[in-house]
Image (tube, rainbow, N blue to C red):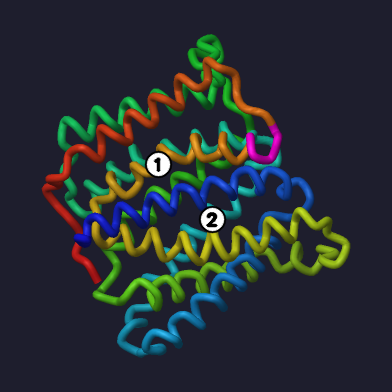
Amino acid sequence: MTEGSRGHLAMLTFSLLVAGSFSLGALAAPLVDPLAINALRFLIAGLLLGVAVLATGGFQRAHYRAPWRFLVLGALFAAYFALMFQGLKTARPVQAAAIFTLTPVMAAGFGWLLMHQITTLRIAAGLLIGAAGALWVIFEAELSRLLAFEIGRGEAIYFIGVLCHSIYTPLVPRLNRGEPALPFSFAVLVTAFVLLTIVGMPAILDTDWLALPPIVWITLIYVAVFASAMTFVLLQYAALRLPSSKVMAYTYLVPTWVIGWELAMRHGGPPALVLVGVALTIGALLLLLKDESPQAVPRKS
């Protein structure tokens, strides 16, 4: 399997795991402060990655040069997750997942600014189709809402988080100096944990952790292990092997996975017309992945 193929497989797994955090997060978000749950989430994920680093060569000083890099990346990722949980207090999972699919458009723009990754006509068409599908889902196939651009408060909050995520993706290869994925990801996670703990200390102390319902703990374990530790490494791994637009193209699968999660949890599916937008996002994914001749590919670690 080529390095590019491994990058694609990593992002396919990434999209499946990320989808679960929307369905579970929507259940837990109203019950716990987003800063508190995400601080604990990053602590658990950081401990898991720390063990993985020790098992695969240990910590080396050369991997942690220029610590300002981890501060920038950690701040962006911490902001994304905190804003995601804040937005999910009112935003519905499928609509939030559709907002997440706007990431490729923004990531392509930041990829051009930071890495000079040129977007071909095929990729530009795919991004536009995917964005159209995302907007169709976000506004629940209601043209009047789309024309008036009536967006909920939760969706607006989460959009800011998605913007942070879009900047993070091209910054990974830009700021990586040859460090392997595990120690690099560990440093970013620890930095994100420290920042969230500092900012969210009042919320952490005010939270009655023992009184939280089981769904919060189930969500916490899932997002810490699967939607943080695993996806963090998968994203880092893929970002070093694929252009930013292709890495984030896999976000177009997230609404489809979320619908599957919602059906499995017996929450019901979206209206039939909304599925048109989902179909457009899948078509955008296929169009983006068909062109395998990017003009600028980040180096691998």
Question: Taking 70 as reference, is 29 above or below it?
Answer: above
Q: Is residue 67 magenta?
A: no
State whether the magenta stretch is mostly helix, strand or loop.
loop
Question: Taking 241 as reference, is 182 above or below it?
Answer: below
Tag 1 secondary structure? helix
User: Which mark sits nearer the N-terminus, 2 or 1?
Assistant: 2
Q: Position of residue 122 (x, y in %)?
A: 18, 31
In the image, farthest residue toward the top? 144
Residue at 63% from the left image edge and 34% from the top image edge: 263
Left or right relative to 12: residue 209: right
Return the residue at label 1: 103
Per the rendering, the mark at residue 8 is none
Q: Amino acid at mark 2?
A: Ala
Q: Which residues are magenta?
A: 263-267
Nearer to us in this view, 225 or 113: 225
Per the rendering, the mark at residue 79 is 2
